Amino acid sequence: MAIRRIYETPDPVLRQISKPVATFDDELKALVADMLETMYEAPGIGLAAVQVGVPVRLLVIDLQEPEEEGGEPVRDPRVFINPQILWHSDAEVPYTEGCLSVPEQYAEVMRPDKIRARWQDVDGKSHEQEIDGLLAVCLQHEMDHLNGVLFIDHLSRLKRDMVLKKLAKWRKEQSLKAA
Ligand code: GNR
Ligand code: NI
């Protein structure tokens, strides 16, 4: 297992349309293991393969907050391969989102409250389930990545520019700290 580099905006890698996974082999399982390790280390609650530079329709999610448990983290890794949204509610809910590819920036995004999704697991087995709450938010955020979309793309031009300006400022401060 290895921690992989997470690509950040405005890297064009993040704008690729990810390709369906066709082969459920050991190489895929190794990529999933690396993605989980990378997500836990970041830390984040989700990660799409394209964020580590592999444009395939694969994402991992673990909603367990690292801060929630003192000591041993309780892990609940979920793997979604070739996910599809079969249905979504008309009702949308706001959630303040962040993204490992837009570090340290947060903004409110509206998304459907509830979705019905179909996906495959690492063995290629199909699953279908109705999903709501934080898992629905996170799954939709990750599925956007598979289509080259970032959460900032859902904001008004004004808000997006504010976030990108704050990101530039944060990066500058980081580089000054490191020097
Ligand atoms: O760690 C993450 N937190 C988060 C918070 C609100 C909505 C979505 C997310 S996903 C994000 C990790 C990430 O960038 N996944 O692509
Ligand atoms: Ni993200």
Image (cartoon, helix red, strand yellow):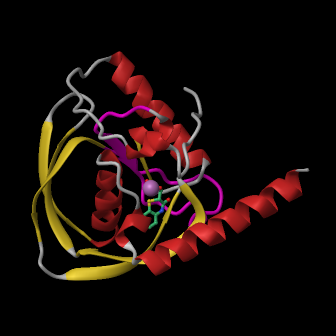
Q: For the point 67% across and 63% down, which residue is it?
A: 168
Side of 63 where 136 appears, left or right? left
**157 part of magenta stretch:** no
Q: Residue 21 location, x and y as percent? A: 24, 29
Residue 106 in the image: x percent, y percent?
Answer: 53, 72
Q: Residue furthest right?
A: 179
Q: Say if 28 sits above or below 90 in the image.
A: above
Q: Which residues are magenta?
A: 54-79
Residue 55 shown in magenta: yes
- The residue lying toward the viewer, choosing from 78 and 90, is 90
Q: Is residue 141 above or below residue 30?
A: below
What secondary structure characterizes most of the magenta part?
loop
Q: Residue at x 52, y 63 (%)?
A: 65
Q: Is residue 168 left or right of residue 40?
A: right
In the image, residue 18 lies at what x, y percent? 30, 37
Seen from the viewer's position, the closer of residues 158 and 50 is: 158
User: Residue furthest toward the top?
Assistant: 26
On screen, 55 above or below 173?
A: above
Q: Is residue 40 left or right of residue 15?
A: right
| Left or right: residue 177 compared with residue 36 | right
Q: Residue at x 43, y 45 (%)?
A: 14
